[in-house]
Image (cartoon, helix red, strand yellow):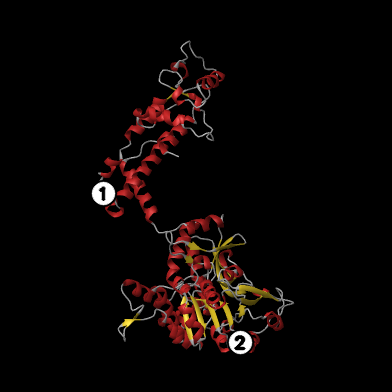
Amino acid sequence: MNEFFQRVYEIVARIPRGKVVTYGQIAAALGDPRQARTVGWAMRNTPQWLDIPWHRVVNGSGGISTRHTIGGLNTQRKLLEDEGIVFNEEGCLDLETYRWRAEGRDKMREELRKLPGVDRLLQEEDMRTLTEKYGHDLTVEAIRQALDLTRQAIMAGQDCPSTDELVEVTRANLEARSRPTLCPVINASGVIIHTNLGRAPLSAEARAAMELAARGYTNLEYDLEAGGRGSRYVHAEELLCWLTGAEAALVVNNNAGAVLLMLTALARGKEVIVSRGHLVEIGGGFRLPEVMRQSGARLVEVGTTNRTYIHDYEEAITEETALLMRVHRSNFRLTGFVHEPELGELVELGEKKSLPVVDDLGSGALLDTSAYGLAHEPMLQESIAQGVALVSASGDKLLGGPQAGVILGRGDLIARLKRHPLTRALRVDKTTIAGLQATLLHYLKGEAEEKVPIWRMIATPLAAIEGRAMAWSKKLAEAGVAARVVDGQSTVGGGSLPGETLPTRLVAIQVDSPDELARHLRAGDLPIIGRIEDDLFLLDPRTVLAEEDEVLIEAVRQNSL
């Protein structure tokens, strides 16, 4: 809706029963008496759905202007007469009697006249500084918005602000418009791989490698030794092969893309046999069967949700079968009356029938999670050792690197994937490759537990977490915040190790409204994400980086008192 029209309708909506205003009166109230005709046009084009007393607007003689009347002269006159307004023989009403003079209307007009124009504001020294910083067009748009909001505030009874105040409103508007929507946050939720918060934080070395790659040119697809075109895939491939024992490797944009590529390149128009117990739904409502169907492969579901046997796979094999597939249930568990073949059994069947076995692991662990008091999560190197043709996983879950999908396995199959046109659509950029390469080097050097943040969080001893929690609680209590240390549980998250938790120590904040505290902490310059349980706001040190401690404590102190 036209902004001028909207302001006209706001005034009309306030005209009381038995009173009228003129087109010129509304124009003057809006700060420009010359716009009476425009007010009339606004009334003529009042939307039918807008419930305002349009009939209470008349011309400067107290008459009805047929050009601007919605329902016709007779309709408007009847509506006004029903409100007790009397017309003379000339069809005019007495404006002295029926004109609406809202209390403070003269003051409002006076305040509106004080508003400076856009050009005048642009001449202010502070505004010139804003123009240099944000550009002329964006600054002008922000000034106009500030003036519109101010005009509405004056019409609501407020005084005209000073020029300095208008400059500050404009500055705040510009800062809000130019502030990136993607920003760092402090994760105090206790969920280590928090999908909504960007999954795995990267090591210092991975961040530095990505920044270095982004800074200028790289040998992304240039062979320095040969002095000619190279391949972007070699930079991470050798490391992945060393770490897992695979013949070859390929990196794409994410694991869903990896699965799509494998099925498209190897099974399009053919059958892929998979257990009904493996047809999982991944994040964001995406279901694996739907992703798989996009490949053009035909899914052949075998067994039941809770029980599938190796003979179910074997009996489903036909001349149209291209692949046998296992999907690791990384984000949920089946317990009770359940059965499924071991991966080795599936590989043995594949060898017997000359069919490749594809293994979608999802979370992509390279370290044994059972060594940290968690259930064992299948590892990439284990799948390779058992003889699968291809295995895929995410790069930003238990691997602890940037978002990517890694595919490992037989050299001939990886070569087919590299040649497929879909690979180009799914390829990763130089910064992702740099970050992944740096992350993989941590594993190669045996330092992943100390260097990769998610593994450092998983491996942190309970005593160390308790020490941080006690220090936080003490500082907050000294500042007058009702804080204490309580027992709790951290989770791995990110669709990994469902149901598995790690004991932790939490800082519990007692306030009148935990929801209000959570909202204020989310609204800070560096948002803080905690959790609420039993009417307490909880902070888990396990997922908070050490350099974030002081910022977190100060923010909680300021918002809890």
Measure how far apart labels 1 and 2 are at the Cα level: 74 Å
Check the picture and name the quadrant holding the N terminus. Answer: top left
Say left or right for 104 vs 299.
left
Q: Please indicate, yes or no, whether residue 316 appears anywhere in the rendered image.
A: yes
Residue 114 as seen in the image, left or right of residue 17: left
Give coordinates of residue 541: x percent, y percent.
Answer: 51, 71
* Mark nearer the viewer, 1 or 2: 2
The type of residue carrying mark 2 is Ser
Q: Is residue 407 left or right of residue 288?
A: left
Residue positioned 58% across, 80% down in the render: 359
Q: Picture quarter containing residue 83? A: top right
Q: Is residue 537 above or below residue 103?
A: below
> On the image, numbered disc 2 is attached to which residue?
354
| Residue found 64% across the figure and 74% down from its top | 278
Residue 175, horizontal then vertical, whole percent: 37, 53
Estimate the x, y position of residue 389 in percent, counting from the top left. Answer: 56, 85
Q: Dot 2: what SS?
A: loop
- The reply to whether residue 107 is in sight is no
Tell me if residue 434 comes above or below residue 88 in the rendering: below
N-terminal-most mark, 1 or 2: 1
Q: The residue under label 1 is which amino acid type? A: Arg
